Image (cartoon, grey):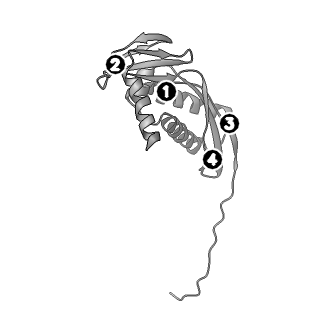
Amino acid sequence: MLTKLIDLLLEAKEYLKPWASVRPWEMGVIIRRGNFHQIREPGYYWKIPVWDKLVRVIVVVTTIKLPPQSIGEYMVRGIVKYRITDPKPYVCDIMGDREILRDIAMRQTQRWLTRTGEINTTMIEKIHRSVKEDVKKYGFDVQAFDLIEYGKIRSYRLIMDTGEEE
């Protein structure tokens, strides 16, 4: 009970103070009365208490690993290096930033691998370009895409005789 009260007071303090700060590795998006108001660069700013909320977005280069994915006879695992270039669509249009980037990268990997049937540098470059184009509308700039692990796999199916006559 006491910890909830402390959390509430700390949150109220953020809403009631008339200034906000954006650190050097961030950009800020000011949300005024629930709507986008403006983008803020690093620095200190005045804000209207209760009406304005600052949403901080990390804009430095970040890397995510994609989970293993089975496509046809291949098992692949990729890595995406990106940064946020436009924080407005990133804050206002999507929820789950890493999930959207991961899903689009995995979808494009599946699309290109199914189309070509083999892994080579040309295919990886096409995946990179496709992912970069698809996520641009969400404020991402994909700087690199690579498949860090890949190989052909065999699929085994176990057929069991249940002993029942049909």
Instruction: Point out the frontmost of discs 1 and 2.
Output: 2
Read off the residue under disc 4: 68
**Amino acid bearing label 1:** Glu
Camera-near label (3 vs 2) is 2
Of marks 4 and 2, the one in the foreground: 2
- In terms of image quadrants, where is residue 163? bottom right
Say whether residue 141 is visible: yes
What residue did someone put label 1 on? 133
On the rendered structure, is 33 left or right of 66? left
Instruction: Kindly report which numbered mark, 3 or 4, lies closer to the viewer in this rendering.
Output: 4
Q: CA distance from mark 4 to mark 1?
A: 23 Å
Mark-to-mark CA distance, 1 and 2:
38 Å
Mark 2 Cα-neighbour bin, 10 Å: few <14, some 14–19, many ≥20 = some
Nearer-N-terminus badge (3/4): 4
Q: Secondary structure at mark 2?
A: loop
Q: Which residue shows up at 48% across the image and 33% down it?
A: 97
Q: Taking the image as drawn, is residue 95 in sight?
A: no
Quadrant housing residue 38: top left
N-terminal-most mark, 4 or 1: 4
Of the residues under marks 1 and 2, which one precedes in the sequence?
2
* Amino acid of disc 2: Pro
Vertically, is 34 above or below 149?
above
Binning the other alpha carbons within 10 Å of mark 1 as few (below 14), some (14 to 19) or many (20 upward) gives: few
Mark number, residue 120: 3
Quadrant the N terminus occupies: top left
